[in-house]
Amino acid sequence: MESRSRINVTSSSSAEDYALQAILEFNKGFKQVELYADSDDACKLVDVYLIMKQRMGEALRVVSADVGSSRPRGRNAGYLSIIIERLA
């Protein structure tokens, strides 16, 4: 099984839904979950992390965070990516 799952956070679902989805990915056996959002949904990604931290407490840690921009369709677009893992 892969060690990391990726969840794209968009405006289509609530932060609580994404937090539950990430927790379920951990329960499936993934060691890490990457939360990824474009600049428009970066605030929701942070909300997802905070909800998870509230539920899981010290069993959750941030492995890395990346803020940057890419050039889809010829224009700059920002993104936020956070890789989290569940501790034993």
Image (spheres, rainbow, N blue to C red):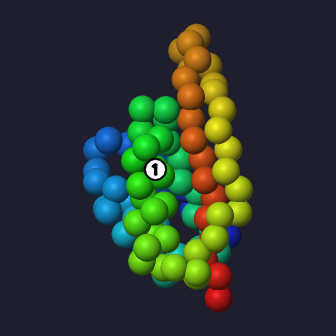
- The amino acid on which the numbered mark 1 sits, given as a three-letter code, is Leu
Disc 1, SS = helix
Q: Could you say where residue 87 lies in the image, as x and y percent from the top left? A: 65, 82
Q: Nearer the viewer, residue 24 or 16?
A: 16
What residue is drawn where x is 43% and y is 73%?
54
Q: Could you say where residue 38 lies in the image, as x and y percent from the top left? A: 49, 35
Residue 44 appears anywhere in the view: yes
Q: Residue at the top extreme?
A: 74
Residue 4 appears anywhere in the view: no
Q: Could you say where residue 60 lies in the image, as x and y percent from the top left? A: 58, 75
Q: Nearer the viewer, residue 2 or 19?
A: 19
Q: In which quarter of the image is residue 79?
A: top right
Tally the numbered discs. Answer: 1
- In which quadrant is the C terminus drawn? bottom right
What residue is drawn where x is 58% and y is 17%?
76
- In which quadrant is the N terminus drawn? bottom right
Q: Could you say where residue 14 lies in the image, as x and y percent from the top left? A: 28, 54
Q: Residue at the bottom extreme?
A: 88
Q: Is residue 50 above or below residue 67?
A: below
Q: Is residue 71 above or below residue 38?
A: above
Q: Nearer the viewer, residue 49 or 20?
A: 49
The residue that mark 1 highlights is 45
Q: In the displayed structure, does residue 32 sit left or right of residue 55?
A: right
